[in-house]
């Protein structure tokens, strides 16, 4: 199941219209000489290191999208679809690469890792590890990325509330805004699948939601402990909030589309039970 070309094109065009006016410069927008490293806690330093690895795994993410949506697809219709998606994917990747390099530059300029070559070596070691979304159907790929983008947006937002170091705080605000825009794109895409294909895609979305895990969870050394410590640095961060947000979005679609309201509500009930979520009513 692929979205009709005109629907996909509209989403991609709308995203790039916003993105072209939403730039910040990883070298000029952040005043490295104003960093006050004494305001950083050790936990905040560890959080920066952790998210740098996650963001810097971009070559794996981009390669996965290129593999799943190749321009060299057998049929012309699919190739055109994938080429249209590429207009988004390459822009999205550019922005994620900006995140990774900005975080790495912060480590360097703050003295967290004063040897830039050594820092790159550490990142490359993680880069070389394999990455797979774990799903191949388009709606599932987009659902996975929706959850990932929401998770990073919420984390950066929560962390920024407690970081007193001014340059890192500003960087986190930039990252939050970018991730929010990425999340918005994938929200629109998933909703279009629902309005186009109806209840056919609900089980596919549910499968991803129930089995979602963040990138690098199965490749980064000591990932679980690091993720727990990272979450502690961002008071109010709820690792289940991305799933709650998605369920709330599904409910809103069901409220507009009476013909799929029942299967959507049944799916939400199953997901809430399985994930032990009490309510989604308070989710904006």
Image (cartoon, rainbow, N blue to C red):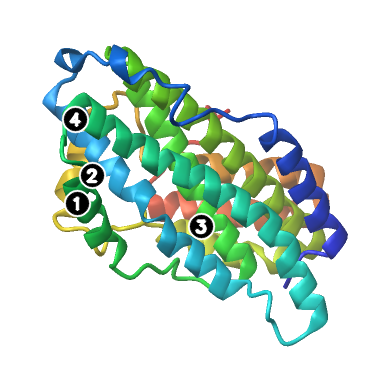
Q: Is residue 187 left or right of residue 150?
A: right
Give percent across and percent down for residue 239.
Answer: 36, 40
Residue 275, compared with residue 141, is above or below; it is above
2 and 3 marks in contact (CB < 8 Å)? no
**Which numbered disc covers residue 130?**
none
Give the mark nearer the N terminus: 2 vs 3.
3
Q: CA distance from mark 3 to mark 4?
A: 28 Å
Q: Using the rendered image of the protein, determine whether residue 84 is visible from the camera's viewpoint.
A: yes
Badge 1 marks a residue whose secondary structure is: helix
User: Residue at coordinates 58% horizontally, 42% vertically from top-left?
Assistant: 182
Q: CA distance from mark 2 to mark 3?
A: 19 Å
Q: CA distance from mark 1 to mark 3?
A: 19 Å
3 and 4 marks in contact (CB < 8 Å)? no
Badge 3 marks a residue whose secondary structure is: helix
1 and 2 marks in contact (CB < 8 Å)? yes
Check disc 3: other Cα within 10 Å, few if <14, some if 14-19, many if 20+: many
Residue with the mark numbered 2? 227
Q: Using the rendered image of the protein, determine whether residue 278 is visible from the camera's viewpoint.
A: no
Give the mark nearer the N terminus: 3 vs 4.
4
Q: Is residue 63 left or right of residue 79?
A: left
Q: Is residue 235 left or right of residue 150?
A: left
Query: To which quarter of the image does residue 158 belong?
Result: top left
Q: Nearer the viewer, residue 160 or 225?
A: 160
The quarter of the image holding the C terminus is top right
Residue with the mark numbered 4? 45
Residue with the mark numbered 1? 224
């Amino acid at each position: 199941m692929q979205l009709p070309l005109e629907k996909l094109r509209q989403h991609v065009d709308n995203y790039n219209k916003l993105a072209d006016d939403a730039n910040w410069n990883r070298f000029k927008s952040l005043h490295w000489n104003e960093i006050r490293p004494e305001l950083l806690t050790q936990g905040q330093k560890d959080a920066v290191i952790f998210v740098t690895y996650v963001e810097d795994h971009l070559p794996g993410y981009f390669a996965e999208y290129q593999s799943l949506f190749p321009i060299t697809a057998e049929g012309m219709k699919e190739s055109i679809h994938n080429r249209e998606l590429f207009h988004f994917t390459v822009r999205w990747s550019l922005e994620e690469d900006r995140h990774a390099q900005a975080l790495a530059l912060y480590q360097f300029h703050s003295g967290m890792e004063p040897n830039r070559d050594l820092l790159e070596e550490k990142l490359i070691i993680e880069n070389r590890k394999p990455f797979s979304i774990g799903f191949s159907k388009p709606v599932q790929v987009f659902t996975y990325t929706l959850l990932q983008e929401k998770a990073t947006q919420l984390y950066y937002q929560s962390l920024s509330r407690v970081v007193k170091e001014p340059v890192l705080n500003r960087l986190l605000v930039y990252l939050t805004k970018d991730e929010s825009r990425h999340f918005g794109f994938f929200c629109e895409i998933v909703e279009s699948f629902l309005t186009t294909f109806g209840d056919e895609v609900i089980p596919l979305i549910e499968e991803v939601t129930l089995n979602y895990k963040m990138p690098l969870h199965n490749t980064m050394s000591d990932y679980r402990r690091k993720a727990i410590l990272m979450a502690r640095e961002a008071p109010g961060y709820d690792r289940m909030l991305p799933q709650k947000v998605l369920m709330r979005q599904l409910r809103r679609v069901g409220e507009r589309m009476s013909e799929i309201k029942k299967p959507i509500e049944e799916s939400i009930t199953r997901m809430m039970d399985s994930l032990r979520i009490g309510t989604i009513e308070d989710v904006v």
